[in-house]
C-alpha cells in the first residue's frame, strides 16, 4: 500500500485566493483526520471523519475552512479566502479502527 | 482526556537504550497511553500503545507503572534515525482516537 497520499506537497498562494488540499487515505481505513502544524501551536486536530461522516469539527478555525469526504477514498480541505496566518503544514491521517493513525507527508502551505 | 507532561528535550548515545518518560497523573481507567514520533519534515508515526500492561513491538517497549500515572518509552538500541520529537498521548480509545499532540520530547541521538 502506498500509504496516505496528500497533494500538493507544497502550495504557495496569495492572500484571498482559494486553496484546496487533497488526501487519499489508506484503502479500507474508516477514519480520516486533518491536522495543522505550526511552530507556535504545534499539531492541532482540525476535523475528523468516520465512514465519510464528519464527527468532530471543533478544531476548524473559522468559516473560511471547510472539509469534505465525498467517498471513502478521497477528502479535501478547503480554505476560502486564504490568509497569511493560515500558513502551516497540513497533515492528513487515516486509521482502520481508531487504534493507530497513519499520517501522510503533509502539504506545506504558504500564503503571501 | 488526561494531560501529559514530558521533558522538552533529551540526548542519548547511538547504540544505547533511550528511556523517554511521560507523566499522566490524571489518567482515568479507560484511557490508553499512545506514543508517536515525528522525524523532521515528515508526518507523525505511530510507535506503540498500551492500557496497563507493558507492551513491546519491533520499534520499542512501553512500560506503564502499576498506578498508571506515568510511563516510559524505551528504544532499546537508539540509532541516528531515531532522532525525532516523541509524543506521549493519553486518550479514550473508543472516542475515535481524537489524538491531541502536546509539545513532546525532542530526542537527539548522538554518534
Image: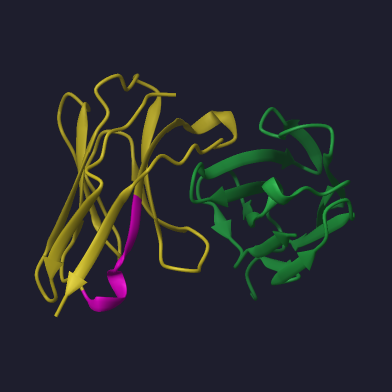
Chain colours: A green, B yellow
Q: Position of residue B96 (x, y in %)?
A: 60, 35
In this rendering, position of residue B41 left or right of residue A10: left
Q: Position of residue B42 (x, y in %)?
A: 50, 67
Q: Is residue A38 visible?
A: yes
Quadrant of the drawing holding the N terminus of chain A = bottom right
Q: Position of residue A52 (x, y in %)?
A: 81, 44
The number of numbered discs placed on residues in the rendered structure image is: 0
- A107 magenta-colored: no
Looking at the rendering, which quadrant does residue A51 occupy? top right
Camera-side residue of B20 and A70:
B20
Q: Is residue A31 visible?
A: no
Residue at image coords 70%, 61%: A109
Question: From what the image shows, is residue A49 above or below residue B41?
Answer: above
In this rendering, position of residue B13 left or right of residue B1: left
Looking at the rendering, which quadrant does residue B33 occupy? top left
Question: From what the image shows, is residue A73 above or below residue B100?
Answer: below
Q: Position of residue B4 (x, y in %)?
A: 32, 32
Residue at image coords 56%, 35%: B98
In this rendering, position of residue B109 left or right of residue A34: left
Camera-side residue of B72 and B39:
B39
Question: From what the image shows, is residue B80 above or below residue B31?
Answer: below
Residue at image coords 81%, 54%: A75
The residue lying furthest to the bottom in this view is: B111
Quadrant of the drawing holding the C terminus of chain A = bottom right
Question: From what the image shows, is residue B77 above or below residue B7?
Answer: below
Residue interval drawn in magenta: B79-86
Amino acid at each position: 500500500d502506498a500509504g496516505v497520499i496528500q497533494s500538493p506537497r507544497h502550495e504557495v498562494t496569495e492572500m484571498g485566493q482559494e486553496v484546496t488540499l487533497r488526501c487519499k487515505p489508506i484503502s479500507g481505513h474508516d477514519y480520516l483526520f486533518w491536522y495543522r502544524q505550526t511552530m507556535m501551536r504545534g499539531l492541532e486536530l482540525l476535523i475528523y471523519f468516520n465512514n465519510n461522516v464528519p464527527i468532530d469539527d471543533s478544531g476548524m478555525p473559522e468559516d473560511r475552512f471547510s472539509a469534505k469526504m465525498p467517498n471513502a477514498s478521497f477528502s479535501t480541505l478547503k480554505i476560502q479566502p486564504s490568509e497569511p496566518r493560515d500558513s502551516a503544514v497540513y497533515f492528513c491521517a487515516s486509521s482502520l479502527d481508531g487504534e493507530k493513525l497513519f499520517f501522510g507527508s503533509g502539504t506545506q502551505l504558504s500564503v503571501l | 482526556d488526561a494531560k501529559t507532561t514530558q521533558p522538552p528535550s533529551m540526548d542519548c548515545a547511538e547504540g544505547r537504550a533511550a528511556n523517554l518518560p511521560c507523566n499522566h497523573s490524571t489518567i482515568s481507567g479507560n484511557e490508553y497511553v499512545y506514543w508517536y514520533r515525528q522525524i523532521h519534515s515528515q508526518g507523525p508515526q505511530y510507535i506503540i500503545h498500551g492500557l496497563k500492561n507493558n507492551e513491546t513491538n519491533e520499534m520499542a517497549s512501553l512500560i506503564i507503572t502499576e498506578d498508571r500515572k506515568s510511563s516510559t518509552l524505551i528504544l532499546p538500541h537508539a540509532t541516528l534515525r531515531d532522532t525525532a520529537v516523541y509524543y506521549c498521548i493519553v486518550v479514550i480509545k473508543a472516542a475515535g482516537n481524537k489524538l491531541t499532540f502536546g509539545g513532546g520530547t525532542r530526542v537527539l541521538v548522538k554518534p
